[in-house]
């Protein structure tokens, strides 16, 4: 699965650890996040999050969209809380979660005040609608034919708020562009969740690698040089991610509050690499599986008396690999690399935690802040300057 329930629990824990940030904008917002963390913990609740404004006109700010409340915003304040209206996306697993937490990536512009909010609500709050995408499986497909797609569908949804009341005790940021924009960069609330995502990404990449190696072995193509090169590329990718995750754990630090934090740089490096490595892994699986991915019959053909013998004969793999084993393997591969289910997993890997293009740019900007100059480069320039002056002093011409 892409989004196991622990992901948002880690996010809420990180927010509660950074309650000081919310307090900077009001003591009650800090108390609210601590109380919410305790509530989620004590009741063992399962959360989704919707942190993106819907994709309407990305060239305009939230307050410049066609309608004032296309993007989720505050309509008014009442004695009981905020009345909110508008849409937010893309809440994975929303229909089966207990609660939703709303916050945002940085990017609010002056004028976006009413949209710069953070709060949490139960999913069955009156006025809150969940618009799901079409499911990638309809619940009737067999587990034999679709070993993954039939079992692991994760729904995604747009949440639309129709003048919904958010009680004051559930508000964490109230109409504050500065707080909305600084939540991520100032607190590092993405740090612990990045570790959770790194472990998940590693599990997923190594599973695709194992499936691809099994396919290559089952049809006897893993003796070919080109196939061996592709399989090694996959294995080395897994090892690179594994090494980065390990180094993030090994180079941990302890905060003043006693929280153990993994090193963010290798985790962000994983975040930069996986959106390229995972699609490449799927491409290699498709390339090695080739036409075999499309020649699989259904499980019914194996039990039909008229066709069973043909199944045994024409779908067999290399010596020692039965027809049934070969077909089931290719069906597993197809769920991963061909089915809508697998394509969603691919899209998830690209976008689950933001636009990879802007994430890479942010990574460089953070790097630049911590590396205002490069001493070894300065040293090399100084040395070469000294040498050239020495040569000049000796009356020799520089050979350009
Ligand atoms: C399977 C899946 C599950 C997800 N689950 C969740 C979830 O549970 N909760 C949640 O909140 N979100 C979730 N997301 C949404 C995710 O956060 C967004 O997809 C991601 O942040 C990218 O935003 P976007 O899709 O609106 O793309 P956009 O931001 O609209 O980008 C579209 C394209 O335009 C480019 N672009 C847009 N704006 C700029 C800019 N300013 N500068 C440069 N290039 C730009 C991008 O590079 C990209 O190529 C999920 C996404 C997917 C695919």
Image: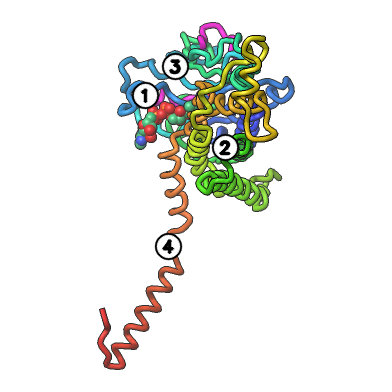
Q: CA distance from mark 1 to mark 3?
A: 11 Å
Q: Earlier in the sequence, mark 3 or mark 4?
A: 3
**Ligand 1's quadrant:** top left
Q: Which residue is mark 4?
A: 373
Q: Is residue 4 left or right of residue 118?
A: right
Task: Between residue 33 and residue 304, name the one nearer to us.
Answer: 304
**Residue 209 showing in the rendered view:** no
Specify the segment rendered in magenta.
112-130
115 is within the stretch colored magenta: yes
Q: Earlier in the sequence, mark 2 or mark 4?
A: 2
Q: Which residue is mark 1?
A: 62
Q: CA distance from mark 3 to mark 2?
A: 23 Å
200 is within the stretch colored magenta: no
Q: Are marks 4 and 1 in contact (CB under 8 Å)?
A: no
User: In which quadrant of the rendered image does the C terminus lie?
Assistant: bottom left
Q: Earlier in the sequence, mark 3 or mark 2?
A: 3
Q: Earlier in the sequence, mark 1 or mark 2?
A: 1
């Amino acid at each position: 699965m892409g989004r196991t329930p622990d992901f948002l629990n880690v996010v809420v824990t990180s927010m509660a650890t950074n309650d000081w940030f919310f307090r900077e904008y009001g003591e009650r917002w800090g108390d609210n996040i601590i109380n919410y963390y305790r509530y989620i913990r004590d009741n063992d609740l399962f959360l989704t999050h919707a942190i993106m404004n819907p994709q309407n006109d990305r060239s305009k700010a939230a307050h410049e969209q066609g309608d004032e409340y296309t993007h989720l915003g505050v309509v008014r304040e009442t004695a009981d809380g905020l009345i909110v209206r508008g849409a937010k996306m893309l809440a994975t697993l929303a229909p089966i979660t207990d609660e939703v937490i709303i916050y945002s990536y940085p990017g609010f512009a002056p004028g976006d005040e009413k949209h710069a909010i953070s709060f949490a609500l139960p999913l069955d709050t009156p006025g809150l609608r969940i618009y799901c995408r079409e499911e990638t499986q309809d619940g009737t497909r067999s587990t034999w034919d679709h070993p993954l797609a039939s079992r692991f569908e994760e729904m995604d949804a747009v949440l639309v708020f129709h003048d919904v009341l958010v009680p004051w005790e559930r508000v964490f940021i109230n109409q504050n562009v500065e707080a909305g924009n600084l939540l991520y960069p100032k607190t590092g609330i993405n740090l612990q969740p990045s570790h959770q995502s790194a472990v998940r990404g590693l599990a997923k990449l190594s599973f695709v690698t194992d499936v691809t190696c099994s396919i290559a072995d089952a049809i006897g193509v893993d003796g070919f040089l080109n196939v061996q090169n592709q399989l090694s590329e996959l294995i080395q990718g897994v090892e690179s991610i594994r090494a980065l995750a390990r180094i993030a754990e090994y180079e941990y630090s302890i905060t003043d509050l006693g929280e153990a934090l993994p090193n963010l740089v290798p985790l962000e490096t994983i975040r930069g690499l996986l959106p390229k490595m995972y699609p490449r892994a799927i491409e290699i699986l498709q390339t090695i599986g080739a036409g075999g991915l499309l020649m699989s019959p259904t499980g019914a053909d194996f039990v039909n008396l008229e066709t069973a013998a043909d199944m045994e004969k024409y779908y067999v793999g290399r010596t020692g690999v039965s027809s049934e084993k070969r077909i089931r393997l290719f069906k597993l591969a197809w769920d991963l690399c061909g089915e809508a289910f697998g394509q969603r997993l691919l899209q998830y890997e690209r976008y689950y935690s933001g636009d990879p293009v802007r994430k890479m740019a942010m990574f460089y900007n953070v790097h630049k802040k911590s590396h205002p100059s490069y001493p070894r480069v300065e040293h090399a320039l100084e040395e070469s300057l000294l040498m050239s002056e020495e040569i000049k002093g000796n009356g020799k011409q520089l050979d350009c």
